[in-house]
Image (tube, rainbow, N blue to C red):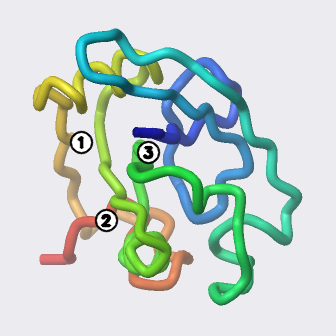
Amino acid sequence: MHIAVASQDFEHVTGHAGMARRFIVFAAEPGAPPHEVKRIELPQEQTIHSADPDASHPLDEVEVLIAGSAGGGFVNRMAQRGVMTVITAQTDPAQAVADYLSGKLAAPAPHDHSQDHDESEAGGCCCGAEAH
């Protein structure tokens, strides 16, 4: 299984997955700890927000994508590609993958939708939660 983690600096899990251009890909095999197999750097036109949904994409090779935040549009676009999106508060990419595999991945902290924050991604708020 291949799991991608959105990581703009290749050190931390980052949010705004639809606009993310950098991902760490981990391989996970039963009985072995996950290990990094490659890094993906996308040009601006290949962010999921901008990419042609019918064209092949470098993230098509993964089964799961972990990010700090993602809007509903991103989640839907990835699901159409056969990729499950998981949102987390965990900031360490390798730990996020290990926690996902063990079923212990920390969910993102809830926040107040009455405060101003980025809702530019199709599907609403970048946190992926529904507004109250």
Q: CA distance from mark 3 to mark 1?
A: 10 Å
Task: Tell me if label 2 and label 1 are in contact, CB under 8 Å.
Answer: yes
| Precedes in sequence: disc 2 or disc 3 | 3
Image quadrant occupied by the C terminus: bottom left
Nearest the camera: 36 or 29? 29
Relative to 72, residue 109 above or below: above
Look at the numbered disc 1 and give the secondary structure of its residue. Answer: loop
Tell me the amino acid under the disc marked 2.
Gly
Q: Above or below — where is 67 with respect to 71?
A: above
The amino acid on which the numbered mark 1 sits, given as a three-letter code, is Pro
Residue matched to label 1: 108
Numbered tag placed on residue 128 in the rendering: 2
| Residue count near mark 1 (Cα–Cα under 10 Å), binned few <14, some 14–19, many ≥20 | some
How many residues crowd around disc 2 within 10 Å: few (fewer than 14), some, or many (20 or more)?
many
User: Label 3: which residue?
Assistant: 67
Q: Which residue is at a point 31% across and 65% down the rendered structure image?
A: 128
Residue 47 appears left or right of 113 = right
Residue 66: image quadrant is: top left
